[in-house]
Image (cartoon, grey):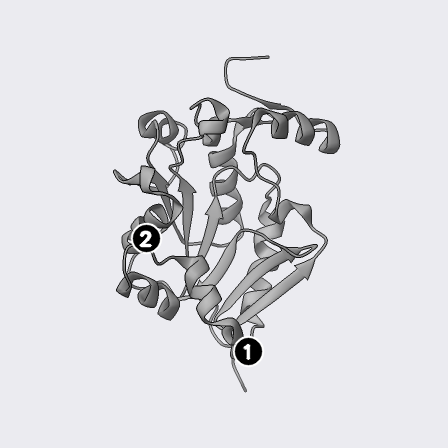
Amino acid sequence: MTTSPAAPVLGAVVLAAGQARRMGGRPKPLIERDGLPLVRRVVLALVEAGVREVVVVLGHRADEVAAVLADLAVNCVVNEAHAAGRVSSLRKGLAALGPDIDAVVVALADQPLLEAADVSVLIKMYECRGAARAVVPRVAGVRGHPVMFDSGAREEILARDAGFGARQWLDAHPAEVIWFDCENAHYVEDVDSPEDLRRIAQHYGRSMRWPGYA
């Protein structure tokens, strides 16, 4: 009798440190979609999809973002150098993951449409990847998130200089990347400006608002 290979132990890094300049400095992870902060929604989607360990990287207004995750089993780490950009936050999160992680999911805290089902599909694609080491969703030619890569890629990223992140690794290893081409806009929608809030609310019929405002 043959046995199926064990499912990989999954960790995730959620990037929630940005300064949100186009939002006037208001922290995007706290935007509420249908009454739930985006960062909390993303964390719950990852956990429901089977991710064992979640690291949320905070920076801008870290205490406020951490407060909406206080009752969840997540590891919140603060990137004091978050003004240096997303790569510094990614590296902080990768370093904070435990040593027993087989694969890493990297998600953004401002993905308003991401659901557990979207993460589950990505994980299935990763499990069927063959000799590849990473899976990246792509919609109409646009790279999306979350992305997944193996623990070896994580180690290789951390072994490089401070400016080397997931995008640089993916660009340097094209033969080891599977592009998951699909029509699921959940992977590519994020919120960068007030106009995005209005557009997503109108197009998808979702309530998008800042906490404390109608």
Q: Which residue is mark 2?
A: 91
State left or right for residue 189 relative to residue 134: right
Is residue 213 placed above or below 97 in the rendered structure? above
> For residue 67, what is the image quadrant?
top left
Which circle's residue, 2 or 1, is located before the other in the chain?
Answer: 2
Q: Nearer the viewer, residue 58 or 115?
A: 58
- Report the residue at 56% width, 29% height from top: 193
Q: Nearer the viewer, residue 189 or 103?
A: 189
> Can the viewer see residue 74?
no
**Which mark is on residue 130?**
1
Alpha-carbon span between mark 2 and mark 1? 26 Å
Which sits in the foreground, 16 or 71?
A: 16
Q: Amino acid at mark 2?
A: Arg
Q: Residues within 10 Å of mark 1 (few under 14, many from 20)?
A: few
Amino acid tagged 1: Gly
**Residue neighbourhood size for the residue with mark 2, other residues' Cα within 10 Å, grouped as few (<14), some (14–19), many (≥20):** many
The residue at the point 27 percent across, 60 percent down is: 161
Quarter in which the N terminus is drawn: bottom right
Residue 65 seen by the camera: yes
Q: Position of residue 24 (x, y in %)?
A: 46, 22
Horizontal side of 125 relative to 84 (left or right) equals right
Residue 115 marker: none
Q: Residue at x 48, y 30 (%)?
A: 28
Q: Residue 141, how many percent across, how many down?
A: 66, 57
Indicate the secondary structure of the residue bearing disc 2: helix
Place residue 58 in its image quadrant: top left
* Camera-side mark, 2 or 1: 2
> Could you tell me if the residues under marks 2 and 1 are in contact, i.e. CB atoms within 8 Å?
no
* Residue 6 left/right relative to 164: right
